[in-house]
Amino acid sequence: MLEPAIEQPGTAWSGGGELLRKAAEGESVQLPRAQGLLPPVRADLHLDTVTAMMDRGLTWQDPSLEASLPALLDAGVNVVVQAAWIPRGVEDPRGVALGKLHRLRNMVQRSGGRAAVVTGPEQLEQVLRDGRLAVILALEGGTALTQGIATLDEFRALGLSMVGLTWTESSSYADSSAEPRTKGGGLTAAGRSLVKACNNRGILLDVSHMSDRATAETIAASRAPVLASHSNDRSQRAVPRNLSESLLTALARKGGLVGVMFHGPFLRAGARPNRTDVAAHVKALVDRIGAEHVGIGSDWDGRIRSPVGLQGSRDLPALYRDLKVAGLTDQELRLVAGDNLLRLWRQVWELRVPAAHRGGSP
Ligand SMILES: [Zn+2]
């Protein structure tokens, strides 16, 4: 069920029948998207559900998951990024990634047609128009890319569409915010090649978990806008995982996107935050970098300490209401709730270069 609070008059999804009726009665018919009418987009830019399922032996239906399939559908969420997370120090990180990508495909296949993996923005729009849940597969940890671009292409063939070059372990591509190397790290030469390879393929680049220097260098190296799928504003909560003012500015100038995440200690120090605190964090970030550059990337099912009143996908409609109370306009809320992700991927997609036209480039 869709939350009416974020729909605007004239652009609400009402189905083809309603459109025909309006046209027949001579009412003006507004098409909010160039390629046809889309429902309001409600996206979560980072979920760790497949890891929780595998660790705990659960199906996607299990009510103990924070972002179970029924919870997502009940909340009207229609786009999710599902991470294949690579733990530190594993012996076969590529094998871990392959296992999680296969399991993700499998859980979508078992959704009874309610969800579909999407690998580009046009496919995403079609799934949205069909009223299904679009699933974007992401890698969280560049250590899995053991053979560089060859491994990237292997994962891409399984539907991978977003790449984070580090988790808390620095990779041969980039430094992590948890262990920024002192030997002049940041984004390595191999990392630059991978950034280019992602650009050429229309794959989204995710800078969450990267060190400050690696983040700045990735933003600069990328031809296309990048996103931080689950990171907060360091001026509001000073931890290395959050983004500094200069990084937020650089990301936004490039057309990028920051997904505000819900881990309590990354939102504020001391007492556990509540949903209103999250709304205030989002509002302050919107005021700082503009609503075009802010989204939601909960990190649910990733062992976070969730805020009071925001303990799973079912609580997202309540957060949208709180965002309105905090002062977001309907238009700003539409952007933050999901439109920004679609816009970002369209831009990334337009800048890709098909294999036949790459020449010597990765
Ligand atoms: Zn993470």
Image (tube, helix red, strand yellow):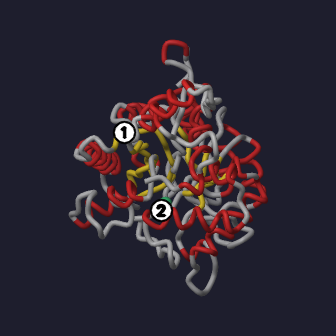
Give me the residue at 24% from left, 44% from top: 112
- Residue tagged by mark 2? 299
The answer to whether any part of residue 179 appears in the image is: no
Which picture quadrant has residue 27? Answer: top right
Question: Residue 353 at what x, y percent from top left?
Answer: 56, 21
Amino acid at the residue labelled 1: Val
Whether residue 188 is visible: yes
Amino acid tagged 2: Asp
SS under mark 2: loop
Nearest the eye: 315 or 221: 315
The residue at the point 75 percent across, 48 percent down is 250
Q: Secondary structure at mark 1?
A: strand
Measuring from the top left, give residue 361's x and y in whole percent. 56, 21
Q: Residue lying furthest front in this view?
A: 25
Q: Nearer the viewer, residue 53 or 210?
A: 53
Q: Earlier in the sequence, mark 2 or mark 1?
A: 1
Determine whether the beta carbon of the residue marked 2 sits less than 8 angstroms from the nearest atom of ligand 1: yes
Tag 1 residue: 117
Distance in Å between CA atoms under marks 2 and 1: 19 Å
Estimate how packed mark 2 is, as few (under 14), some (14 to 19) or many (20 or more) residues with alpha carbons within 10 Å: many
Q: Could you say which quadrant of the image residue 157 lies in?
A: top left
Instruction: Residue 339: give its label.
Output: none
157 with respect to 179 (left or right): left
Do the CB atoms of the residues marked 2 and 1 lie less than 8 Å apart?
no
Query: 67 and 362: which one is in front?
Result: 67
Disc tally is 2
